[in-house]
Amino acid sequence: MEMKQLIEAGKTSLGIEFGSTRIKAVLIDDNGNPLASGSHEWENQYVDGVWTYSMESVWKGLQDCYQDLAGDVKKQYDAELTTFGAIGFSAMMHGYLAFDKDDNLLVPFRTWRNTITEQAAGILTEKFHYNIPQRWSISHLYQAILNKEEHVKDVAFFTTLAGYVHYKLTGEKVLGVGDASGMFPIDMNTGNYDSKMLATFNELVAPEGFRWKLEDILPVVRVAGESAGTLTEEGAALLDVSGKLSAGIPVCPPEGDAGTGMVATNSVGMRTGNVSAGTSVFAMIVLEKELSKVYPEIDLVTTPDGALVGMVHCNNCTSEMNAWVSVFDEFAQSIGASVDKNTLFTTLYNKALEGDADCGGLLSYNYTSGEPVTGFDEGAPLFVRKAEDKFTLANFMRMHLYSSLAALKAGLDLMFKEEDVKVDRMFGHGGLFKTKGVGQRIAAAAMNTSVSVMETAGEGGAWGIALLAAFMKDAGEGVTLQQYLDEKIFAGQSGTSMEPDASDVAGFDAFMKRYMAGLAIEHAAVDVLK
């Protein structure tokens, strides 16, 4: 009864995140404890050469996810959802959603997954003296200009998926600084878009004669803890088709999935970092100072409260390893030895720990798609060995685990070895870390640093944005985001920590020498198989 009253009185916060394959909602109490959840599965589509999601699927998915949450609350607490203390929305970062002055979508949503902006990203990186990746929103806008696309002259506003959902539900054209930093570079001194780079861009496109200036069509930047509007009557009706939800609920700045991952792993302070490893993999480290030069392999983004973050993002991680596990599963079924999939994964992952530290000479590339960090626009999964190498199951599985993190290590080594970046604690989350102690040990070897895994990290980004929504109340009392997470949410929780094993580190380094030298083999495979 007490929980029912707490929920119906709005003593809760709601976070909803649009992931690449799932939309998830998490309801928390004022101490950050998850109370209920809901979800909706969805997939991107490849239409006319562009990876996209339809706006219909965005709203259907959001409504279905919310109704799933409402059903969970009803089942667990016999409570009706009518209000919340605060709400937050987050989504995949980057991409391109452009609207005219009447809020009409000008072209289908172009997601982060597209690699169609190489020319624009290259020019902007050179002009700004700042790494501008292909997936960033500004790359998409400038590529559309270079392509002479008719719609660009009519752009009145462009944003990310989280920014779009937030705008439709609140009427506010704002974006959390973490998500904004994946649209356009942020000036660390002002906490806003870099004014010199804005001027450079405006000068660059001046000959086109557009009526707009870049600063006028970007969302307004907000930092964690600030208000970003309230749920409107139209927004409440759009979110909750049952009509029970009230308007006027405070909404926090919309954020990207990188920022919510940092919050969910308590990795927003300097010298902290996290690795998210699943279908793709990325690592983020909160930096003490700016890097000495531009690295195409390293993105510079921010935490939700505006601290500088070095980020290495790789398109490929566990997909190729999962494909091999499926082959082993098929073999087991063929001989009548059906094995539970979780048991199969656990067995094969643990088998990898029996392998040689350097994988016995085996080499693989997990490139089911292109991998910009190592210079590939396209990929071809590849396994290669010499006849005399130690081809055992243990070495084979260890090789795939190494390969899943090898491109990431190539990027991170630039920070660790070239820039002398220091990390006190690194948190791992995602599918690679599900088998206890295995992915964690391999990640510790790859980064030569301690890696921790927390139970709560499984709640993911939806929990992270719910925490950011709840943080608005504490921020008004002068509490920083780091203090809020340390003292209220993660007090006494450090996770299960694992130090790097010296022989594993040496073995991974030996594997990396083969891996970097063998990139020519992968290039040949891509060219031949086209």
Image (cartoon, rainbow, N blue to C red):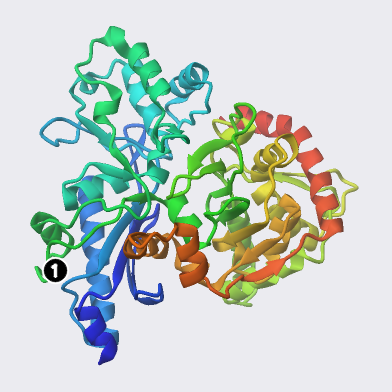
Name the residue nearer the viewer: 252 or 146. 252
Looking at the picture, how far across and down is residue 50, in whole percent? 35, 34
- Which residue: 53% across, 73% down? 491
Looking at the picture, how far across and down is residue 349, in whole percent? 69, 66
Residue 409, relative to residue 106: is it above or below? below
Horizontally, is 375 left or right of 438 in the view? left
Q: Which residue carries the number 1 mark?
A: 245
Looking at the picture, how far across and down is residue 3, in whole percent? 29, 86
- Which residue: 82% across, 57% down? 504
Horizontally, is 354 left or right of 151 in the view? right
Residue 226, relative to residue 526: is it above or below? below
- In which image quadrant can residue 68 be found? bottom left
Residue that extends furthest to the bottom in the rendered view of this protein = 1
Horizontally, is 447 left or right of 3 in the view? right
Amino acid found under the numbered disc labelled 1: Leu
**Quadrant in the picture for the C terminus:** top right
- In which image quadrant can residue 29 be found? bottom left
Name the residue nearer the viewer: 385 or 406. 406
Looking at the picture, how far across and down is residue 368, in whole percent? 56, 43
Secondary structure at badge 1 equals loop
Residue that extends furthest to the right in the rendered view of this protein = 388
- Which residue: 61% across, 38% down? 289
Residue 356 makes an appearance in the image: no
Horizontally, is 431 left or right of 143 in the view? right
**Quadrant in the picture for the N terminus:** bottom left
Name the residue nearer the viewer: 368 or 314. 314
Name the residue nearer the viewer: 138 or 348. 138
Density class for disc 1 (Cα within 10 Å; few <14, some 14-19, many ≥20) is many
